[in-house]
Amino acid sequence: MTKRTVRLRNYLAYGANDYLGAGAMAVISTWILFFYTTYCGLSPGEATLIFAIARVLDAITSPLIGHLSDNFYRNRLGRRFGRRRFFLLISIPLSFSFSLMWVGGQHFLYYLCTYVFFEVVYALELIPYETLAAEMSDDYKVRAKFAGSRILFGQSSAILATFLPALLEMFGSKDSAETFFWLGLTFAISFMIIISLVWSFTWERSPEEIDALHDATERPSAVESFKRLYRDLWSTLRIRAFRLHLGMYLGGYISQDIFNAVFTYFVVFALGGATLGSAIASTSGLLTLMYIAQFISVMTFIPLCLRWAPAPSYRVAVSLYVLALFVLLGLYVMHPANPTPWIVVVVLIAGLGRGGLNYIPWSVYNYMADVDEIVTGRRREGTFAGVMTFVRKTAQAIAVLAVGYILQASGFVSGSTTQSTPVLHTIVAIMIGGTLLVLAVGFLISLRFRLDKNTHEVLMGEIARFKRTDAAPVPADRREVVEDLSGWRYEQLWGRNPVGRHD
């Protein structure tokens, strides 16, 4: 890799992109189900059907974009603008589509089309972007700083996503969809500006470097390209470190998706004021506090991961989140006269845990292509980014889908300012039980995860040895490290396995 100095402006530009990545997801996971069922006349089932349809289409688009990103260097546009950064460029005007999702009073087909279109734009930009940390540097600490910058900006955008509705209601119409339209428009314009900055201050491997790793003259047929696309997609799951990483990632993120989807209903119907507007303001205030705590938490977990390694740090984050959930359960059981101070404490503790759960998986992700390289002898950052984006959006959709249908089955009444006691019990059961179950899975998986600064150093050393075709005997401890990370015997590495072969 050609060495270039990574400066502060590069860290900031790279990190700023998570205003789209995390910001859009924060707005969607926190408000979209509530918006659809309150201001758009959709039932919970209709609203969640939109997410289900989008995920079916995403099963095709996300892997396809990742595959295209990996192979786009083969044509003139890719060699001129970059196989990654070309997609950033065309995403700048398309990201305005986010604002179209938040127009109230439309029909089901309108919301389906606008949601699906933005999901495609989101994948078109985010998948190539997610490869850039590995493209810009192979240094462990530099990549950790890239991940830290990204998550800090993402937490900032999440604060804005929760605080902005309350702020807009102070100056706009109460109890109307107008608040959410201005929320969507504000974020859409921000996305366009930020993607422009990312495009201006990032880089990727040169076409010559990519040619050295791949056969630039290879021109597979359309049928072969499609077969290879899905073969590559599933082959990522044959990398042991990536499978464990996905388990930790989903444990951290699905738990938050479940909590976010239900928390708004909990505040609105159990703690809300006389109007929807005041309830939205209450929710915004509590979630804003939580995301502020998450921001502080990320700054704490960046050095903690470098000192302790990712897996132990992950377990600390899970423990904090679990503590907050048990306190929340105690409040529901005891029904204190004034629960607000306690709920503030709960969201602050939860935020400290959630910040770590947000940072650690994306920090670890930056090293997955290195583990893959020692198995395949190729660089497939785009493929892994496609899998990550597909998994992330699918997990979020499943969580929201499940919440919607469970609420509907419990007797939830769309558009009502009050709900029955069974519905409130259901909300709490989902928020506590569902979140705890997913966190437990992530915690158990983290006990088997071994990638850290030291093992990554061994990994990069062995990759360099393979590139030199060094036939010297390999110490047993180094063999053990790369076999544990890759899930393959040492003799099968560097393309001597079904994953590394094209045929």
Image (cartoon, rainbow, N blue to C red):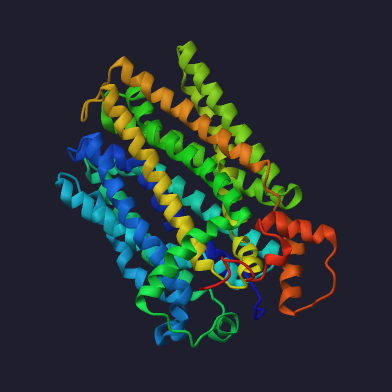
Q: Is residue 5 left or right of residue 68?
A: right
Q: Is residue 187 left or right of residue 302?
A: left
Q: Residue at x 67, y 79 (%)?
A: 3
**Could you tell me if residue 17 is visible in this image?**
no
Q: Is residue 489 above or below residue 250?
A: below
Nearer the observer, 394 or 492:
492
**Could you tell me if residue 444 is visible in this image?**
yes
Q: Position of residue 91 (x, y in %)?
A: 36, 69
Q: Residue at x 72, y 49 (%)?
A: 309
Q: Is residue 289 above or below residue 467?
A: above
How many numbered badges does the structure rendering display?
A: 0
Q: Is residue 308 above or below residue 487?
A: above
Q: Position of residue 170 (x, y in %)?
A: 31, 40
Nearer the observer, 256 or 346:
256
Nearer the observer, 28 or 227:
227
Q: Position of residue 65 (x, y in %)?
A: 40, 67
Q: Residue at x 27, y 53 (%)?
A: 115
